[in-house]
Image (cartoon, grey):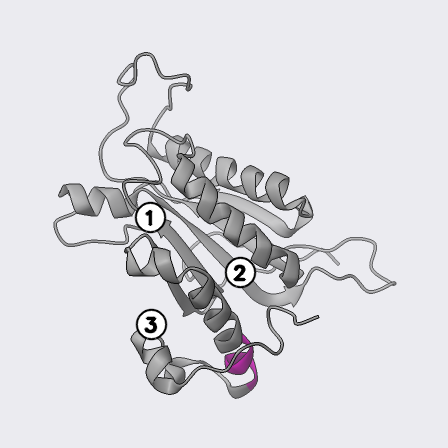
Amino acid sequence: TTGFFDGGQTLSKGTLEEFGMNIESLPSQTRGKALSKAKRTATELFKPEIRAGKVRVSEDERGLVISLAGADYFDPGSAILLPEIKETLKKASGLMKELERFVRVEGHSDEDAVLPGTNPGREERIYLNNWDLAGARAINSTVYLINYGKLDPSWFQAVSFGSYRPMIVEDPGSPEAKAYNRRIDIVILTERSVKRKTSESKFGLPKSKISNTETTTEEE
């Protein structure tokens, strides 16, 4: 079978640029080839959502980043997965089966303060703050990915960045910016595979590649 990081369809440079890809920006030839193949696959899969502005596929020092954002994915102040984000997560779970890579699901919120009791009648707990809300979005999305795709939970991290890593920084108080800033990022990490050597009793998640933030240490 064709793996997510091996083989796959070849697209022209013009097509790649149409989807916002920059071949020259890839950090190394070997790693760049693997990531460009993965990025092509994800871009083709999410083409309708990308054209609708609901999904962004990019690549940075962490790996492949699939951002799910927009008003149809999360209500303000809520971590409940709306029907449209569930359909998008179903697509993403299919990719996860091909990977055998660590995945970090990052939760984000807009800058509005979380006020207790602002969602009366909703079957949802009250969130303490935006950290709590964004973390719940990451956890709910991670659990849905794992359960729907019958994926190995040891592949996944769920983390919260609160409102402190907005996708749109200009006019963050606008309705459009708020809709895009309450999102999740599915980060397919490229540091190491989850496959273990026979001599390993445990394996750890790769160290964070985000500067000036938390790190996870690998177990010896």
User: In the picture shown, does residue 5 fall above or below 135?
Assistant: below
Which sits in the foreground, 90 or 188? 90
The three-letter amino acid code for the residue at tag 2 is: Ile
Secondary structure state at the residue bearing disc 1: strand
Q: CA distance from mark 2 to mark 1?
A: 17 Å
The residue where tag 1 is placed is 69
The three-letter amino acid code for the residue at tag 3 is: Phe
Which sits in the foreground, 145 or 160? 145
Mark 3 vs mark 1: in front: 3
Q: Residue at x 12, y 49 (%)?
A: 171
Span highlighted in magenta in the image: 30-34
Which one is earlier in the sequence, the residue at label 2 or at label 3?
Answer: 3
- Residue 97's quadrant in the figure? bottom right
Q: CA distance from mark 2 to mark 3?
A: 19 Å
Asked if one can make out residue 71 in the rendered structure from this viewpoint, the answer is yes
Q: CA distance from mark 3 to mark 1?
A: 17 Å
Q: Are marks 2 and 1 in contact (CB under 8 Å)?
A: no
Which sits in the foreground, 208 or 175? 175
- Residue 183's quadrant in the figure? top left
Secondary structure state at the residue bearing disc 3: loop
The residue where tag 2 is placed is 188
Pointer 2: residues within 10 angstroms few (<14), some, or many (20+)? Answer: many
| 100 in the magenta segment | no
Magenta-colored segment: predominant secondary structure: helix
Mark 2 vs mark 3: in front: 3
In the rendered image, residue 202, in percent from the top left (x then y), is placed at 78, 53
The residue where tag 3 is placed is 19
Secondary structure state at the residue bearing disc 2: strand
